[in-house]
Image (cartoon, rainbow, N blue to C red):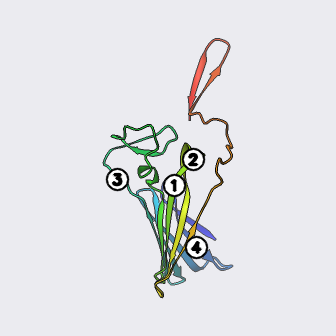
Amino acid sequence: IHFGSQTDWSSLTDIYICDYYGSPISHIALTQQHGLLSQISFLDKNDTMTKIIKLNYFEKLAPTYEQDRWGYYKRKDWKSSAIDSLAIKTNSLKNISFHNGGTIHLDYESNERGVQEHGGIRLRSLCIEDRYSDRIDTIRYKYPDGGILVYEKCVSDETISYDSFDDTVYH
């Protein structure tokens, strides 16, 4: 197996599966747009495409965004302290389209514990659509009421105290 990447090594672009002598048997090409994986192409040893998978993401709804205290998007004109349930999905996987015409649609909801919202999103449902029938299979996810906090609190900065000064670290 050989890997190909951007010239600055910032992202993986290709995976080559080779025989014992290093000759390609097949090739997987990974295409990105705006820093997100947008297409996975499967090619044979002659670089002829055999299958393709396309990935689409939720896009920004407004031209100006900022991040909430958890690092998720919210519209700049969002006046509420509540989570912006539409903007928070920005750049999350929306659907996966397969070479045979099938599609998987993903939907998310705000992460919450009881009535209290917490940072992030979680999967609400998967809808699996097949081009050969009118049927759509839906898987809905239910999370237990109350949930379980993994962390008691989430902080974006910490103060480290030394003998003669304090230092604040942001993460």
Rendered position, 24 above or below 109: below
- Residue, disc 1: 109
- Residue, disc 3: 61
Q: Secondary structure at mark 2?
A: strand
Name the front one of labels 2 and 4: 2
Mark 3 touches mark 4? (CB < 8 Å):
no
Q: Position of residue 25 (x, y in %)?
A: 59, 81
Q: Earlier in the sequence, mark 1 or mark 4?
A: 4
How far apart are labels 2 and 1 at the CA level? 9 Å
Q: Which class describes the residues within 10 Å of circle 1: few (<14), some (14-19), or many (20+)?
A: some
- Residue, disc 4: 16
Figure quadrant of the N terminus:
bottom right
Rendered position, 91 above or below 156: below
Asked if residue 108 shows in the view, the reply is yes
- Residue, disc 2: 112
Q: Secondary structure at mark 4?
A: strand
Q: Quadrant of residue 170?
A: top right
